[in-house]
Image: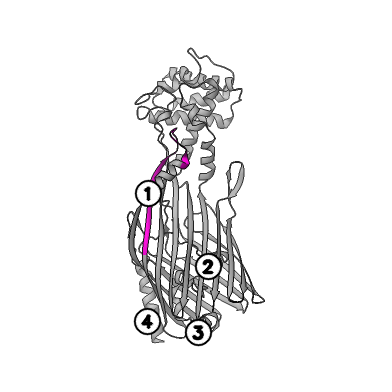
Amino acid sequence: MKSVRVGLAIVGTIVLAASQSFAGEWQIVGPRALGMGGANVAVADDATASYWNPGAFGFFNNPEAGGDYGNRGWSSQVGAGVGAQTHEDLVQEVDKISKFDFDALDNGPLSANQVSDFIGLVDQLKVFSDNENRAVSIFVDGGLRSQFGHFGFGVTSLVDVSAKGDIDLNNIAPVGSGAGFSISDFSNPDNFGCPSPCNSSSAFSDVQRTNIREHLDTLNNWSDTDKTNYINAMDNGFVNAGETPTTQDVERINNVASTADVAAGAGGELSNNNSSLLFKGIGLVEVPLTYGHALSEDLSIGGNLKFMKARVYDLSIPVFGKDDDFGEKLDRALDNYSDKTNVGLDLGGLYRFGDDLRVGLVIRNLNSPKFGSIKQRAQVRTGVAYKPLSFVTLAADLDLTKNETTIGGGFKSQNIAAGLELRLLKILMLRGGLYRNLAKNDIGMVYTAGLGLNLWLINLDVGVALSKDKTDFDGDSIPEEARGTLALSMLF
């Protein structure tokens, strides 16, 4: 019992120290873990335990541990996975912006039938900028991990990159503003294909016209003449385009007027717009040396000493411009990176309550290794596994740290996960689970499923995850989060 108390005291001290800082986002590595909702801290019983909980290594090849742990003399796995998240409908908003013909709108004075598109584009830029957490995140993992008794060695690759918008709401004038525009650029009918004098047309209803006028009256820089000309130019544009203004169109016109009021004098015309996508993230290769030691027949601790090499990305790609397409800009930007190396330390513990119940705790990157502008702060995660029947495993995990992400802007990740595994006829494993981010609920529940085939000494495993919530892209409804992974294992 003394060794048990000592082990628990060590683990408790580590948790207390690590919980004082935020961590990078925890990735779900391996198809068994993904199929079970990401609940694997107290489940991993092969070479993948070097990532999920190196404390398990103390029980490997140990007859006193019993079950899969005690019988595991050697194991190896090679696999890869990929996942994506879209936050706050970024994909949908980018899709809306991409439908506007920017090159046509920044090519001299607008024609009357381009007024609706111009208003729509400027309004969409404003809508996009209103949410700093609007982003898309990409996760990739892959590697080869091997376990020899209480020792382990391998190579794991982890990629975590996020993109979010940096929207220019200053350079939004239609034409002719030069170094800085004034409200007269928005109220000049000539800029909207309606030569002076631009008289009232009949597209707007009386209610819509009054709504726009009342909104303009709340702004600071609009004269009565500016207000009248702006309303008439917008009205004339809808008439020439053969469109009937909707309530949403009126809201867009008001949003554009507000944006112009704030930006007047600070920016220029739309052709100079500097809106861009900011990419920030890290591609990390870890080479861990793993060792585990059983302090008693029920408590084991272990750790990884890792060589770590990181490729850090922090780049900006213009959204608009005629010089080349977005793909070429991205290729050039991805050539701008920095390579950094460091050493990391992971610790884990696993406690058994008999043969059916296990509780685990793991701390990754305990020493918070730094790579340029990105610091891999400690991640702390706990898990429990229970076998009510010999062929059924139930599991649950929880992040104890509220983890920072590459999205930034206060966007955190703290996942709770649960899953189950059914072993049928010793050759087929069926898995299911779910997980959810407790720190940010923009995506909601994510459901997972997995399949494993035990082909004598070789296991083939697949896992997938799809969120319940959807977003729209190019007219199709797609999940806000999706992941998939595949692995081949050899177990002895």
Q: Farthest top residue?
A: 197
> Element under label 3?
loop
The residue tagged 2 is 39
Give the image location of residue 103, x and y in percent.
48, 29
Q: Work out whether 272 lies above or below 60.
A: above
Among the two numbered marks 1 and 3 on one chain, the one whose residue lies closer to the N terminus: 3
Marks 4 and 1, the one that precedes in the sequence: 4
Distance (Cα) linking label 3 and label 4: 20 Å
Which portion, as a residue range, is magenta? 308-327
Label 2 element class: loop
SS class, disc 4: helix
Q: Amino acid at mark 2?
A: Ala
Neighbourhood count class around disc 1 (C-alpha, 10 Å): few under 14, some 14–19, many 20 upward: some
Does the residue at mark 3 contact the one at mark 4 (Cβ under 8 Å)?
Answer: no
Disc 4 to disc 2, how far (Cα)? 27 Å
Which residue lies under the disc numbered 4?
6
In the rendered image of this protein, does residue 117 appear above or below residue 276?
Answer: above
